[in-house]
Structure formats: structure tokens, C-alpha cells
Image (cartoon, helix red, strand yellow):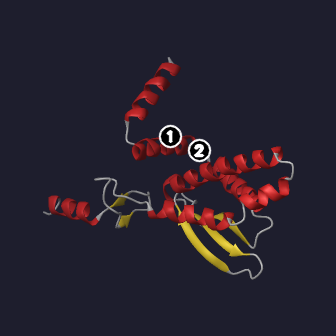
Amino acid sequence: MGQQISDQTQLVLSKLPEKVAKHVILVRESGSLTYEEFLGRVAELNDITAKMVSGQGKHLVFEVLPRSDSSALWKMVVRVICTKINKSTGIVEASRIMNLYQFIQLYKDITSQASGVLAMSSTSEDPDENSSSVTSCQASLWMGRVKQLTDEEECCICMDGRADLILPCAHSFCQKCIDKCQAYFVY
């Protein structure tokens, strides 16, 4: 019976718009994620990005924003900071804060890409040359993906407008929907 429900869920997901289906999958994944698994994924991303950009001048560091995970409702309020650092100068070149959903999406992107690059370099005659050409500006590319993820916030009511207000629980609202709700709830 469990398989039947799963098949039905897959059928429903396949009929949803792509963005909505992605959101459903992320919500489902984050629902079963334990705090220890989450911390493990943060550490894993730090390891992967360090390996992938080892010969470059920049690298990414992921860390949990202090005190953003201290609540029993940590999944709603936790924030992960992604920082791009110049290795030679130690200067922070860029920094973005992600919520749990954005972090899970980035985790999937990076681990998927890294496994492809590592598989490609293991089948190559000269793995160092192949690996360095693929990852020549990897930190900047990944930071671009972080920026894209954090800029994608859309209104969770109309799912159309750009979010003007983002609550700690990661729900986002556009000004048009906020105005409509305020007009509706005025005494």
C-alpha cells in the first residue's frame, strides 16, 4: 500500500507546475531531516567545496548562523551563511544567508555536480588537468547559484510577485497581497 501512495504522489507531482513540485519535494525532504543530518550536510558541503576548489584562489565556507538553530522549531528559523573568501588575502568577497529550503536545494545542486566532476576525473587519463578545467571558477559559480536561490523569493499567496516581506518561517509575501490582507482584516 505504501508503494501505491508513492505512485499516486508521483502522479500528482508530475501534473504540478515545476516550481510547485520542487517546493513540495523540498518540504518533504526537510520534514524528515534531523538536526544531526543537517549539520552533517553543512560539514559535507564544506568538504566538497574545499576539494573542488583546492587549487583556486577562492573558496566557500558554510556555517550555521549563531543562535538561529536554538529553537525547538529550528527548521523554520535556521539560517546558513555562505561566504566566498579570497584564500590569499583572507578577505570576504561575498556572503549570503539562506533558509533551510534554499540550503537543501544548494546541497543537492553541489553534491550532484561534484559527483559528476569526480566521476569524470576518475575516468580521465589526466584527472588533475580535467578537474582543474572544470572547477576553474567553481567558487564564483556556486556563489552565483546561492545568489540566485536567495533572490528567487516569491509571494506564497499569489506565487507571482517578488517577495517584499520574508518572515522567519521563510514564508514570503508581495506588497500587493499584504495590502489586500490588510484591507480585509481592517476593523
Residue 86 lies, with reference to residue 180, above or below; the image says: below
Q: How many marks?
A: 2
Percent across and percent down for residue 171 are 39, 56
Q: Are marks 1 and 2 in contact (CB under 8 Å)?
A: no
Toward the top, the furthest residue is: 1
Examine the rendered structure and indicate whether residue 159 appears above or below residue 90. above
User: Which of the 4 image quarters holds residue 74?
Assistant: bottom right
- Determine which residue is flagged by label 1: 28
Q: Nearer the viewer, mark 1 or mark 2?
A: 1
Label 2: few (<14), some (14–19) or many (≥20) C-alpha neighbours in 10 Å: few
Question: What residue sits 69% from the left and 81% below the top?
Answer: 91
Location of the C terminus by quadrant is bottom left
Query: Would residue 12 be found to the left or right of residue 87 on screen?
Result: left
Going from N to C along the chain, the mark reached first, 1 or 2, is: 1
Quarter assignment of residue 43: bottom right
Name the residue rendered at 34%, 53% in the picture.
156
Question: Residue 152 versus residue 34: which sits nearer the camera?
Answer: 152
Q: CA distance from mark 1 to mark 2?
A: 9 Å
Residue ID for mark 2: 33
Q: Quadrant of residue 182?
A: bottom left
Q: Residues within 10 Å of mark 1 (few under 14, many from 20)?
A: few
Q: Amino acid at mark 1?
A: Arg
Q: Position of residue 135 (x, y in %)?
A: 72, 61
Residue 172 on image: x %, y % = 37, 59
Above or below for 111 versus 151: above
Tell me the amino acid under the disc marked 2: Leu
In the rendered image, the vertical position of residue 113 relative to residue 61, given as above or below:
above
- State the residue at coordinates (58%, 55%): 106
